[in-house]
Amino acid sequence: MKRYGNLFEKIIDIDNLLLAHYNARKGKTHYSEVQEIDKDPLFYCHQIQQMLLNNQYIVSNYRIKEIYEPKHRIIHILPYYPDRIIQHAIMQIINPIFESTFISTSYAARKGKGLHKHHINYVNIYKTNQTLYTVYNSTSNSFIHQ
């Protein structure tokens, strides 16, 4: 695997942090915290940059929330500032690196992929190759059925 350097400098770049703020705020502009940061995003991004440069950033406590749609789940939520902005800043730099290493038939948690695209690909493969292999697992043994 190729080695990538200067990632930290790219993550803390002020342009990357500003872009991270704008990406993290999508669909959240009604939050008071986001509205406060929108008043002077450059100031807050400089604060994040200084926190990271001075090793002062500590991940905040998660807020726990139960949701029931479409099913019951417990989710853990970080505060918008600075945590979500920093998450986006990191992902904007490392995601292209990881994307280039994934195989084309990997679909989970990838932008532009997902269950629907996987299903379409599966149907197309099945149409071209009528032989379908199914893997059966049991506690006693595993075998492939053709």
Image: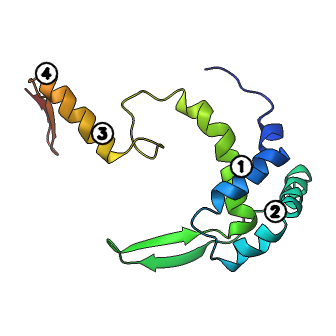
First reached walking from the N terminus: tag 3 or tag 4: 3
- Real-space CA distance between mark 4 and mark 1, rounded to the nearest whole angstrom: 43 Å
First reached walking from the N terminus: tag 2 or tag 1: 2
Q: Which amino acid does the dot numbered 3 rest on?
A: His
At which x and y percent is residue 72? 35, 75
* Number of the front mark, 2 or 1: 2
Q: Quadrant of residue 33?
A: bottom right
First reached walking from the N terminus: tag 3 or tag 2: 2
Q: Dot 1 lies on which element?
A: helix
Q: Disc 1 marks which residue?
A: 89
Please report the residue visible at 70 percent of the width from the left and 52 percent of the height from the top: 20
At which x and y percent is residue 2? 65, 20
First reached walking from the N terminus: tag 3 or tag 1: 1
**64 w.r.t. 27: above or below:** below
Q: Quadrant of residue 8?
A: top right
Please report the residue visible at 72 percent of the width from the left and 50 percent of the height from the top: 19
Please report the residue visible at 61 percent of the width from the left and 20 percent of the height from the top: 1
- Real-space CA distance between mark 2 and mark 1, rounded to the nearest whole angstrom: 14 Å
At which x and y percent is residue 46? 89, 57
At which x and y percent is residue 32? 70, 79
For residue 66, the mark is none
How many neighbours does mark 2 have within 10 angstroms: few (below 14), some (14-19), or many (20 or more)? some
Q: Disc 4 marks which residue?
A: 129
First reached walking from the N terminus: tag 4 or tag 1: 1
Q: Which amino acid does the dot numbered 1 rest on?
A: Ala
Q: Disc 2 marks which residue?
A: 41
Q: Disc 3 marks which residue?
A: 118
Q: Which amino acid does the dot numbered 2 rest on?
A: Pro
Q: Dot 2 lies on which element?
A: helix
Q: Dot 3 lies on which element?
A: helix
